[in-house]
Image (cartoon, grey):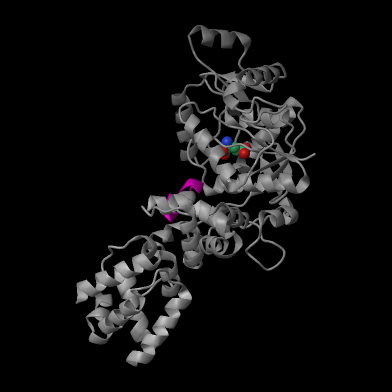
């Protein structure tokens, strides 16, 4: 039974990199019929915030990622917040102490800094000298008697190579001399990530650790702890880095990188899910548009690419437009767009929103485009664009609008077919070409020379608004 986990630290918004990690864990769990565990890594008391934890969960749910065990849903292997697992960690520090795998180190931060500088100056990789490694019981008592505080360090076997098979990277081989004895509990008694992550993954029976490549250098330390505690090692899969288009590590410099920001910018969750799945993976058939169900059916962790993934913002936008335009049904997409309509001050009932969306959704890349695209459906007192004005200052254009008004003034309702019929009549009667008829009417109804299909607009806004806008234009340019 596959058991995977997503283990975020609640110290900020869920960003694309972490969202991709969560997504791959989720997909792999569903693909294999296994379980996804959500574990909150909130040992950094200063930076961890309850609000961030809530937002993380909310963003994950929005993306369509559900977990089987976690702080909110419970499970047999809790608690699922590290801040609630202090006693468990203590127990395992004791075990490591008894087996001689850890020792107390009394070196002060100043001494360590001195050592570090010296190593760098001599061109050696900075690592702990091992000064406190073999202190006698008496020496320790003496130091503690002097009121010295201590950290717990892991006794790293000299010269050993840690070799493991990463499901994505292949064989990874690291000489432990590169890092030396590392701290597992700080002087204030708080345990560090590399230690607690092992205790948690082992006790939660995690079978596959799928996480970002930035953690690759932590893995040998974690393997040493697995071995020291006699835990079974999980399989590891380190996901490729995500780069911006300039091929540097994706960061805020490249624009919005939090899931929340994309949500607020009018992206739909299915497009995000689809887009994130392409960061390091590609479906077998030659397509970029692929549903959650298909991804789950096809995905395998071993198919994830080793090479870095480049985040293509334009592609995500395009994907979003495909979901808005073709994939989501009209009711659904309209429902999601309502907060945007309202946010832009476009108030109406749901039926009206449906009609508007039916007309404009083909032209939307994100819901943000609703602001401009839906404007003619809601705003009557618009300005006439500078270049648009010429169409009504022109005698023939003005005449077209006048005749149009004469023809509709007794209408009680108007359809797009009526509109087409009337404009054809005007072309004939006045001997004016298509554009000479449509443009003045378009400007009279919207104030601009481009945008929405006018016949559709007329049908949706209804005859009263049409009359009102036409009268307004005739007065303004008369
Ligand atoms: N809390 C760690 C992070 O957010 C988890 C790393 C891991 O998955 O082991 O990066």
Residue at figure coordinates x 72%, y 54% from the top left: 299
Q: Position of residue 148 (x, y in %)?
A: 49, 13
Tell which residue pokes out farthest to the bottom in this image. 431
Q: Position of residue 296 (x, y in %)?
A: 71, 52
Q: Quadrant of ligand 1?
A: top right
Q: Could you say which is closer to the camera, residue 419 or residue 337?
A: 419
Q: Could you say which is closer to the camera, residue 341 or residue 205?
A: 341
Q: Position of residue 269 (x, y in %)?
A: 56, 52
Task: Report whether 340 appears left or right of 19.
Answer: left
Q: Position of residue 463 (x, y in %)?
A: 38, 68
Q: Could you say which is closer to the camera, residue 373 or residue 415?
A: 415
Residue 310 image-quadrant placement? bottom right
Quadrant of the rendering where the N terminus is positioned:
top right
Q: Looking at the image, is 78 positioned above or below residue 37?
A: above
Q: Looking at the image, is 118 positioned above or below residue 87?
A: below
Task: Report whether 170 appears left or right of 140.
Answer: right
Residue at figure coordinates x 56%, y 56% from the top left: 331
Please provide the residue range marked out in magenta. 252-261
Residue at figure coordinates x 59%, y 26% from the top left: 82
Residue at figure coordinates x 33%, y 77% from the top left: 441
Q: Looking at the image, is 187 positioned above or below residue 369?
A: above
């Amino acid at each position: 039974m596959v058991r995977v986990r997503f283990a975020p630290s609640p110290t900020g918004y869920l960003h694309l990199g972490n969202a991709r990690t969560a997504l791959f864990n989720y997909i792999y769990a569903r693909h294999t019929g296994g379980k996804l565990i959500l574990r909150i890594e909130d040992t950094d008391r200063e930076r961890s915030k309850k609000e961030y934890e809530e937002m993380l969960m909310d963003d994950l749910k929005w993306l369509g990622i559900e977990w089987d065990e976690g702080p909110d849903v419970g499970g047999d292997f809790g608690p699922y917040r590290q801040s609630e697992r202090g006693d468990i960690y203590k127990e395992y520090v004791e075990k490591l102490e008894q087996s001689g795998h850890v020792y107390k180190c009394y070196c002060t931060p100043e001494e360590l800094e001195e050592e570090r500088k010296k190593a760098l100056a001599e061109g050696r990789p900075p690592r702990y000298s091992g000064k406190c490694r073999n202190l006698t019981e008496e020496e320790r008592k003496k130091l503690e008697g002097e009121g010295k505080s201590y950290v717990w360090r892991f006794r790293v076997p000299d010269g050993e190579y840690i070799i493991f098979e990463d499901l994505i990277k292949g064989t990874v081989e690291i000489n432990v001399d590169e890092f030396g004895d590392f701290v597992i509990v700080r002087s204030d008694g708080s345990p560090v990530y590399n230690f607690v992550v092992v205790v948690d993954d082992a006790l939660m029976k995690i079978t596959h650790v799928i996480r970002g490549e930035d953690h690759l250098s932590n893995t040998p330390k974690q393997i040493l702890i697995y071995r020291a505690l006699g835990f079974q090692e999980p399989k590891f899969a380190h996901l490729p880095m995500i780069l911006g288009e300039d091929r540097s590590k994706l960061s805020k410099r490249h624009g919005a990188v939090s899931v929340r920001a994309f949500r607020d910018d009018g992206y739909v969750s299915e497009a995000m899910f689809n887009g994130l799945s392409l960061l390091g993976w590609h479906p077998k058939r030659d397509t970029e548009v692929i549903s959650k169900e298909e991804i789950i059916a096809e995905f395998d962790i071993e198919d994830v690419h080793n090479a870095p993934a480049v985040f293509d913002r334009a592609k995500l936008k395009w994907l979003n437009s495909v979901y808005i335009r073709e994939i989501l049904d009209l009711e659904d997409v309209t429902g999601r767009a309502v907060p945007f309509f309202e946010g832009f001050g476009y108030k109406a009932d749901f039926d009206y929103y449906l009609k508007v969306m039916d007309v404009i959704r083909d032209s939307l890349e994100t819901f943000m485009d609703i602001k401009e695209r839906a404007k003619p459906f809601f705003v009557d007192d618009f300005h006439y664009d500078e270049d648009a004005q010429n169409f009504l200052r022109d005698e023939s254009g003005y005449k077209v609008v006048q005749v149009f008004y004469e023809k509709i003034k007794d209408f009680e309702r108007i359809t797009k077919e009526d509109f087409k019929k009337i404009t054809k009549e005007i072309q004939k009667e006045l001997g004016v070409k298509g554009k000479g008829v449509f443009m003045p009417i378009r400007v009279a109804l919207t104030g601009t020379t481009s945008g929405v299909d006018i016949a559709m607009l007329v049908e949706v806004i209804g005859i009263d608004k049409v009359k009102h806008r036409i009268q307004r234009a005739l007065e303004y340019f008369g």
